[in-house]
Image (cartoon, coloured by chain):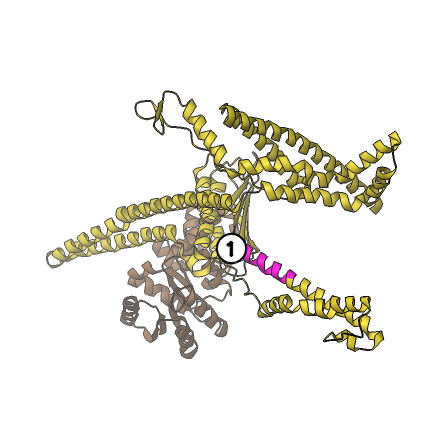
Chain colours: A yellow, B brown
Amino acid sequence: MALNRIAGTTIAALAKGAVLFGVAMLGQAVAIVMLAAIMLSFGLGMVFLFPSAVRLVRGMTGLNRRLAREWSGVEIEAPYQPAPPPPVPYADGWYREGRNLYKTPRIPAFNRRFNWMLKDPATWRDFAYLLADPWSGAMAAAAPVLIVALGVVQFATGTGLLWPVLALLALATAPWVAPWGVRIHGRFAHALLTPTEKARLTRRVDQLARTRGEVVDSQAAELRRIERDLHDGAQARLVAIGMTIGAAEQLVGSDPNAAKALLAKAREASATALHELRQVVRGIHPPVLAERGLGDAVRALALDSPMRTHVTVDLPTRPQAPVESAAYFAISELLTNAVRHGEATEAWIDISHREGNLRVSVTDNGHGGADPARGTGLNGIERRMAAFDGVLALNSPAGGPTTAVLELPRALGTARAPHPAWKSVTIAVGWTLAAVPTFPQGFVPMVIKLTGNGETGKSWFLALHLPESFQWPVIAGMIALGGAMYTAAALLTAQAKRAEEGEGCG
Amino acid sequence: MRVVIAEDLHLLREGLVHLLGAYGFDVVAAVESGPELHAALIRERPDVAVVDVRLPPTFTDEGLQAALAARKQVPGLPVLVLSQHVEQLYARELLADGSGGIGYLLKDRVFNGEQFVDAVRRVAAGGTAMDPEVIAKLLAGNARNKPLSKLTPREREVLELMAEGRSNAAIGQRLYLSESAVGKHTAGIFAKLGLAPSDDDNRRVLAVLAFLNSR
């Protein structure tokens, strides 16, 4: 059984290696085309060749990224800068590019595309990858296959036995070497095809600028709505109440009964004003959310919903207030949609957390077919979520059921445990003192002993002062101790670095 | 009748003290925070407490929590909770122990002194005073409830008033019916909802609320 499995994975890894090598050779051909296009573009001015060649290169590296993801589990984002917008004509119908005017958008559009491709460092990294791949990453992945192939050829032609022997060796070690080779290729692809730090940050800034714009817009709209509600509602009623009371004041002497009736009216109006204010407050920040947090606020929402709604909540702490509010309104919107558009009768809400992320899933038994592209409500939720780097995943086949999953990263403000002092001390001691047991007390006395100078220069080498039978064990122990210190320090350093990165970026 | 008042807004607190004083209540303590309220309830053992949900120091549901905690120590301690908003969730928590003596009203209801004082008296006597808005929400949530849909419109009106905690006499007054007619309606309601009939007003109300809450 286990043997079968090992054989299966080995053969799969060998086949992957072979395919990767084939792809790399194809990539090499594309790189040569690119090289020719570069020379023709910049040497002979045949610039129209350049964008097509770059597109070919990008197609090829795109294939490599996909293979790296599927076969090596290495996720590689596309590193390219966003494509330039199409040129817009001026009022007179002409297109302007620098100092030149054009009648049609073709040339300005080409210029933009050309510059975009030329100035994107990713273009050149792609090119470098295609040039180097067959001789490095793909070579590592395909090494066992290539050695076996050479061995077969040499054995068949009877020109020697070196390669056939190596081929047997390669086959024997293939279960370990082959999958490792495929992973090496993934690493190599990751090194050259992933966005540079600058490209990643540029993109992040673009995204943040966009979401910030949306947040500011929606907040402004929200404030306008609140202003209108107050202006047309409570404010107007208060004016009416004041006028009614004034009229009652005038009548109180002459017609006490009419005054009494007016005062009763004023009281009614004040109750209505209060009712309207309550609605406005609910729209700004529901009181139960402020009083009890997300879990109970959603339970209250569920109780008020006409559907049978089941709520499960698993939260260790209260999320940050803005996140809580965004999640609440999103859930509220989803429930409303389920009733109004899906005609659902039952819903399930699950609020949970994972590694500091807030996760909300809302499922209903309605007839499905919800689509964010059409529903403005869903669109609004997506925008609200984007402000917190959150995402809405919607699965709503026609006929139902509909499941919406909201994921808000780092919403629970996990106060990350501070780096423990003992770790910092271990790291410092490890790096500074590890050399002492390793070299002066380990390798150096070993060399001295091997060269037979043990009697002449004992110096401060501990092992050499001991009785003969203890010397080797002590030397071995010292080297082991030094090695362990180096390993511990390296591991802890890597761990600390990972923790720091996990905190800093996203 | 001895009453404890908890309300953090000075004006409203004074207003409540005046109002209840004018109707012959004896205000033994008027406090403004959750911990003070809890201490006053345990110390004074009032006949009824009028409590604002949101109180210092946390300005969350401090008042509600203090009242619930005091009721755990003194079972059946009558508490009337006032709030700017009503939630079914809070109503359920208040009614959970099933021992009555619970009121839950919007602050607006204070406007009508007489009705408000009537509610306070009802709660003090171990009855119930639920805000019409809570009942409306409860009934809306029960829209698909089979037995409820069998009620006649008149029976539904009676049910609403009964759920608010009113006696047959008060319901009759409201709907311009004789007390015996109301009695006939309530018997009909209990039969349709499948609840055991009971002569005791208070037990009857709690049964209806439990039924509505059972969703």
Snapshot quadrant of residue B47: bottom left
Q: Amino acid at mark 1?
A: Gly
Residue A156 drawn above or below residue B133: above
Chain of the residue under the numbered disc 1 shown in the image: A
Depth check: give the residue in front, B95 or A108.
A108
Mark 1 crowd level (few <14, some 14–19, many ≥20, 10 Å Cα):
few
Which residue was labeled with disc 1? A504
Q: Is residue B108 left or right of residue A257?
A: right
Work out which residue is located at the far front of the displayed protein and give it: A456
Q: Which residues are magenta?
A: A490-506
Q: Please, what secondary structure does the residue beneath circle 1 have?
A: helix
The residue depicted at 87 percent of the width and 29 percent of the height is A157
The residue depicted at 40 percent of the width and 73 percent of the height is B37
Work out which residue is located at the far top of the displayed protein and give it: A103
Where in the figure is residue B151, as x and y percent of width and height? 47, 47
Say if the magenta span includes residue B115: no
User: Main structural element of the magenta stretch: helix, strand or loop?
Assistant: helix
